[in-house]
Image (cartoon, rainbow, N blue to C red):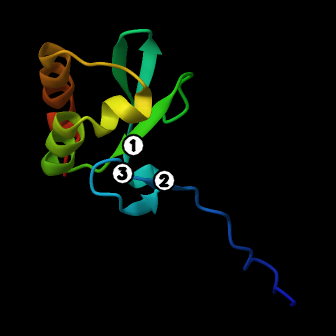
Amino acid sequence: MRMERGSIRRHTPQRTCVACRKVRPKWELIRLVRIAADDVEIDLSGRGAGRGAYLCRERGCWEDGLGSGNVEYALRITLTRDKRDRLIKSAEELWL
């Protein structure tokens, strides 16, 4: 198959939201990363070191993912209620 000059397509990395299970381009999701044995932070660069999990930019996905234990399972961590609330509060300004 011959491609004309300038028409090369770049690969777009795909990731799955751990709450709603929708597959989307990586840049549309927000990454959570486990930074220590018992802590999680929002990784806006998407390249932070550590085990990661992705959530959509919607409040429902954050509440479902953090409430159902999907994020905890994906990150292999146990979150306290305070840490869950802190993550939701931090993410409020990132939602569409």
Three-letter amino acid code at disc 1? Tyr
Contact flag, marks 1 and 2 (Cβ < 8 Å):
yes
Name the side, left or right, on which 86 lies relative to 54: left
Find the residue positioned furthest to the right.
2
Q: Quadrant of residue 90?
A: top left
Contact flag, marks 3 and 1 (Cβ < 8 Å):
yes
Q: CA distance from mark 1 to mark 2?
A: 7 Å
Instruction: Please tell me whether residue 76 is drawn above or below residue 55 in the rendered image.
Output: above
Name the side, left or right, on which 82 lies relative to 8: left
Residue 44 appears in the figure: no
Name the element at disc 3: loop
Q: Nearer the viewer, residue 2 or 33?
A: 33
Name the element at disc 2: strand
Three-letter amino acid code at disc 3? Cys
Q: Nearer the viewer, residue 56 or 96?
A: 56
Which residue is depicted at the point 42% across and 28% down?
75
Which residue is depicted at the point 42% across and 61% down?
24
Residue density around tag 2, few if under 14, some if 14–19, many if 20 or more, within 10 Å: some
Q: Which residue in the structure is indicated by mark 1?
A: 54
Which residue is depicted at the point 30% across and 39% down?
70
Contact flag, marks 2 and 3 (Cβ < 8 Å):
yes
Find residue 92 and report its horizontal and vertical position in percent. 14, 36
Instruction: Please tell me whether residue 29 is drawn above or below residue 1 in the rendered image.
Output: above
Q: Which residue in the structure is indicated by mark 3?
A: 17
Q: CA distance from mark 3 to mark 1?
A: 5 Å
Residue 19 appears in the figure: yes
Q: CA distance from mark 2 to mark 3?
A: 7 Å
Which residue is depicted at the point 86% across and 90% down?
1
Q: Earlier in the sequence, mark 1 or mark 2?
A: 2
Q: Which residue in the structure is indicated by mark 2?
A: 15
